[in-house]
Image (tube, rainbow, N blue to C red):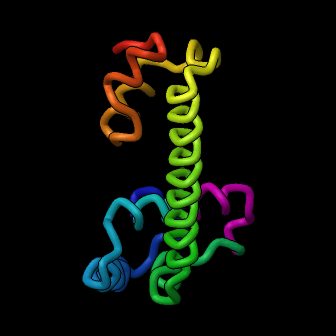
């Protein structure tokens, strides 16, 4: 709750009860904290009369939209990263000249994911 706009904090007991309920539903505390921070950032330019009191914000589950957006963003990032790793694995298996742009960290991630073998890495002229 420390990230919530301080002049709009109200009903600490209600807030804590709602936070506990969210956590029993499987919401990670970090996700909820990030949701509060996102709301604080989103409402930073608002007049205070337009910012929801904390107890109302938690009770009306306004945090849920922020948590869902965070999950969507994480999923998009994971998909993009998987696509990127697949492209890098193709470069390595084809021994593309583009291999020179692959970093050691990316090589390690590809090996860990078993998308390429140590032999393919060496054949492409890469190493850790």
Q: Say above or below: 79 vs 17.
A: above
Q: Say above or below: 77 vs 57.
A: above
Q: Say above or below: 93 vs 71.
A: above
In percent of width and height, residue 105 lies at 41, 23
Q: Could one spot residue 6 in this view of the protein?
A: no
Task: Please report the residue visible at 50 percent of the width from the left and 52 percent of the height from the top.
Answer: 78
Task: Please report the residue visible at 50 percent of the width from the left and 57 percent of the height from the top.
Answer: 74
Q: Classify residue 107 by image quadrant.
A: top left
In percent of width and height, residue 82 lies at 51, 48
Segment tinted magenta in the rendering: 39-49
How many marks are shown on the rendered structure?
0
Q: In the image, is 118 to the left or to the right of 101? A: left
Q: Nearer the viewer, residue 119 or 52?
A: 119
* The residue positioned farthest toward the bottom in the image shown: 60
**Which part of the image, by quadrant, shows the C terminus?**
top left
Q: Nearer the viewer, residue 30 or 83?
A: 83
Q: Nearer the viewer, residue 66 or 115?
A: 115
Q: Nearer the viewer, residue 37 or 73?
A: 73
């Amino acid at each position: 709750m420390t990230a919530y706009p301080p002049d709009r904090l109200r009903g600490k007991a209600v807030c804590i009860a709602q936070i506990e309920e969210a956590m029993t539903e499987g919401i990670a505390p970090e996700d909820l904290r990030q949701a509060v921070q996102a709301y604080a950032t989103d409402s930073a330019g608002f007049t205070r009369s337009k910012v929801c009191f904390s107890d109302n914000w938690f009770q009306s589950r306004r945090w849920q939209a922020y948590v869902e957006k965070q999950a969507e963003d994480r999923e998009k990032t994971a998909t993009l990263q998987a696509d990127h790793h697949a492209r890098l694995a193709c470069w390595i298996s084809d021994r593309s000249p583009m291999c020179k742009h692959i970093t050691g960290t990316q090589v390690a991630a590809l090996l860990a994911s078993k998308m390429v073998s140590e032999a393919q890495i060496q054949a492409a002229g890469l190493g850790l």
